[in-house]
Amino acid sequence: MVQKLISMLRRRAFRTDNSGTSAVEFALLSPIFILLLLGMVAYGIYFGAANSIQQIAADAARTAIAGLNQTERQTLVAAFLANNAGGYPFVDASKLTYQANDSVADGSQFVVLISYDARNLPIWNLFPGIALPGTTIKRQSTIRVGGI
């Protein structure tokens, strides 16, 4: 009888003891939290690269406006990209390609199109089974030629 009472008290003490619950909760939730955190960092890097490519296109178009004709504007865009593209975050200048042309037959607008091969960003290795954005980031900027 005493043995039964001691056994009952031990079970009750075991059920009411919550000294290890924090460790169990941490073990269950930490992998999910770490995965979410890494996902936010990886997508943040991707969006940062996309924003940098848009800024490169806009800056190249603003630089090109100083040219008097399409050939001179294309030369200015090439010089801008060669000198400045490596200074943008998350962008490897060797993976950039560009097109710079007048967009309308009358030459009233000049378009700079930048393509970036983003396969070296960490987002592609993080989630191999999930649908992800394209590996090529394309952005363009259009600027009016010849004043107002």
Image: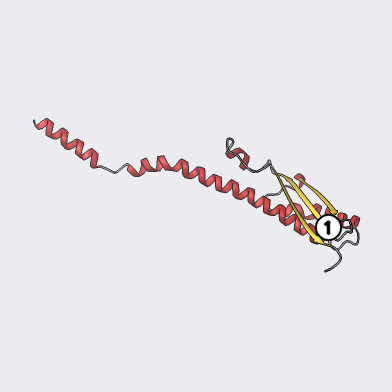
Q: Residue placed at 51% from the left, 45% from the top?
A: 36
Residue 3 horizontal/vertical position (percent) = 12, 30
Q: According to the image, label 1 marks what residue?
A: 110
* Residue 38 as seen in the image, left or right of residue 119: left
Label 1 crowding class (10 Å Cα cut-off): few <14, some 14-19, many 20+? Answer: many
Question: Which secondary structure, mark 1?
Answer: strand
Q: Residue placed at 51% from the left, 42% from the top?
A: 35
Q: Quadrant of the N terminus?
A: top left
Q: Give the amino acid type for the residue marked by disc 1 in the picture.
A: Phe
Camera-nearest residue between 32 and 13: 32
**Which residue occupies the extreme left position in the image?**
1
Residue 46 horizontal/vertical position (percent) = 64, 48
Residue 126 horizontal/vertical position (percent) = 58, 39
Camera-nearest residue between 30 and 87: 30
Which picture quadrant has residue 84?
A: bottom right
Q: Quadrant of the C terminus?
A: bottom right
Q: Is residue 33 above or below residue 81?
A: above
Which picture quadrant has residue 66?
A: bottom right
**Which residue occupies the extreme front position in the image?**
105
Camera-nearest residue between 118 and 1: 118
Residue 28 horizontal/vertical position (percent) = 41, 40
